[in-house]
Amino acid sequence: MDRITAAQVFVRIVEQGSMVGAAQSLDMSRSMVTRYLSEMEAWANAQLLHRSTRKLSLTAAGEKVFENCLSLLDLAQEVSIPSQQDRVAEPEGSIRISCSQFAATVLLPKVIDPFLDQFPKVHIDVHISNQVTDLVEDRIDLAIRITNDLDPNIIARSLGRCRSVLCATDEYLKRFGYPVYPDDLAKHNCLIYSNFGKSLWHFSKQNQEFVTSVSGNFSANESMLLLQATLKGRGISLQPESAVEQLISNKKLVHVLPNYEPASLGIYAIYRSRKHQSVAIRKLLDSLISHFDRIDQGNK
């Protein structure tokens, strides 16, 4: 059997999470999909998928074969005839995205809304999660992560920086005092984002670095939840600038320690392969890159 077609079938099974889904997306009978999978397992001399009534998942051998299949399809794409390379395909199909609630509600709508208007044949499925995700296991096409601790082994594209602002309500500050120096935060109830920084907050002023140990009675792994607690006057929190700039302008929040700049975080798009991507995913990545480039230029 054709190994390139077998590789295409195997990749599609993994992406769709089922034999039926792969058959439908390839316009192929399920029996033919099963034959290609059996042939792949015979070539590998190993079981490639764990099969259950709920879903399919890759075995250890399957993960290696999946990466090899992606590489094979990349090579096959590179030797396509010129008429196929030059043909402009209209983006279509599904894109499954994993991101935090903040990214889903504040960052992505400014990209996704015009993207779907321009490419109506694309379907975007957003999954809210702050956890490190296995793109293959969870069938995620694109993950948006905000972090300074990126795994060097994953494939990622830097999109920009997420600047933070220290803030609290005026009522809280009148009751407990206005911090003048970063060390003053030790006396305050600090609402902590549990996925990074933990009890240490980093600031800079005039090229001088400050590290402050903070504590509080409330923490969460979602910045939007911490924002709600901050608005209720429960304490001081570090928030993404884009999430609170309007609240500060409307005086619902006060910018705390405005002369000290909190450390920023990287914004990354994480995906399975640099080359083996659908037209829709490539176009969405281009839209994300352009959007954050405009933001970066506006901040200069």
Image: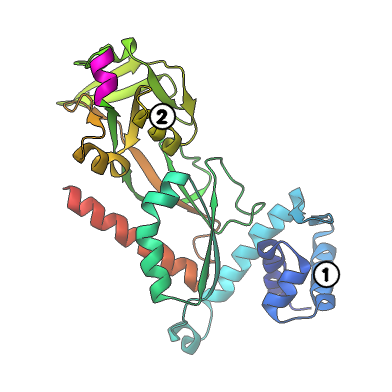
What is the crowding at mark 1: few (fewer than 14 residues within 10 Å), some, or many (at least 20)?
A: some
Nearer the observer, 44 or 130 = 130
Q: Amino acid at mark 1?
A: Glu
For the magenta stretch, what is the residue range? Answer: 170-175
Query: Residue 78 location, x and y as percent?
Result: 51, 75
Residue to which mark 2 is pinned? 229
Instruction: Give the residue drawn at x 25%, y 19%.
Output: 173
- CA–CA distance between discs 2 and 1? 56 Å
Instruction: Give the residue drawn at x 45%, y 86%.
Output: 87
Nearer the observer, 168 or 275 = 168
Majority SS type along the magenta span: helix
Query: Residue 123 location, x and y as percent?
Result: 53, 69
Question: Does residue 158 appear anywhere in the picture?
Answer: no
In magenta stretch: residue 173: yes
Instruction: Give the residue drawn at x 20%, y 26%.
Output: 260
Where residue 214 sits, quadrant-wise, is top left
Q: Is residue 186 above or below residue 93?
A: above
The quarter of the image holding the N terminus is: bottom right
> SS of the residue at dot 1?
helix
Nearer the observer, 218 or 84 = 218
Where residue 223 sits, quadrant-wise, is top left
Q: Is residue 234 left or right of residue 36?
A: left
Mark whose residue sits in front, 2 or 1: 2
Question: Does residue 150 appear anywhere in the picture?
Answer: yes
Query: Residue 23 location, x and y as percent?
Result: 74, 75
Nearer the observer, 52 or 73 = 52
In magenta stretch: residue 53: no
Query: Residue 178 location, x and y as percent?
Result: 21, 17
Residue to which mark 1 is pinned? 39
> SS of the residue at dot 2?
helix
